[in-house]
Image (cartoon, rainbow, N blue to C red):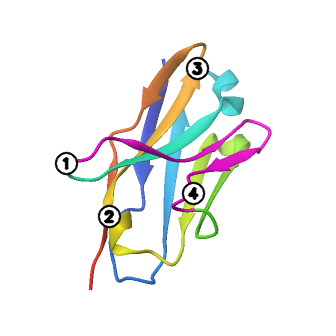
Amino acid sequence: QVQLVESGGGLVQPGGSLRLSCAASGSILIRFNPMGWYRQAPGKQRELVATITGGGSTNYADSVKGRFTVSRDNAKATAYLQMNSLKAEDTAVYYCSMRDRGTDYWGQGTQVTVSS
């Protein structure tokens, strides 16, 4: 069983930055599982933001390339999402995900609101 807890969301002005964290707990073996960040805006489907493998290979949605950076600390079983140059359209609930032996686990989500 895997548990994921996100933190770091909040209200930020356009152009500002936020850093999200996702702490995973469970077997020590999960530390190298692939992880991802997704988001869901009101009235829209959940969409991929970024993914990172256990070895650190990353993938980004076109909408966030050059602005967001995903990273991880395997020793802490924690993933991060550094979000810079935030725009109003980045407003959403952000979810962390981890795949473990074919099963996708999700955190509870953290709200990010970009508004002046």
Residue at the spot x=54%, y=31% of the render?
A: 98
Say whether marks 4 and 2 touch (CB < 8 Å).
Answer: no
Q: Mark 3 Cα within 10 Å, few/some/many (few <14, many 20+)?
A: some
Q: Nearer the viewer, mark 1 or mark 3?
A: 1
What residue would you read off at disc 3? 100
In this picture, is 64 found above or below 1? below
Is disc 3 placed on a helix, strand or loop? Answer: strand
Please tell me which residue lies in front, 62 or 99. 62
> Residue 21 at x, y = what percent?
51, 54
What residue would you read off at disc 1? 43
Residue furthest out toward the right? 55
What residue would you read off at disc 2? 91
Query: What distance separates the C-alpha of mark 2 from that of mark 3?
Result: 28 Å
> Residue 83 at x, y = what percent?
52, 68
Three-letter code for the amino acid on which mark 3 is drawn:
Asp
Q: Mark 2 Cα within 10 Å, few/some/many (few <14, many 20+)?
A: many
What residue would you read off at disc 4? 62
Is disc 1 placed on a helix, strand or loop? Answer: loop
Magenta segment: 44-64
Magenta span contains residue 57: yes
Magenta span contains residue 96: no
Three-letter code for the amino acid on which mark 1 is drawn:
Gly
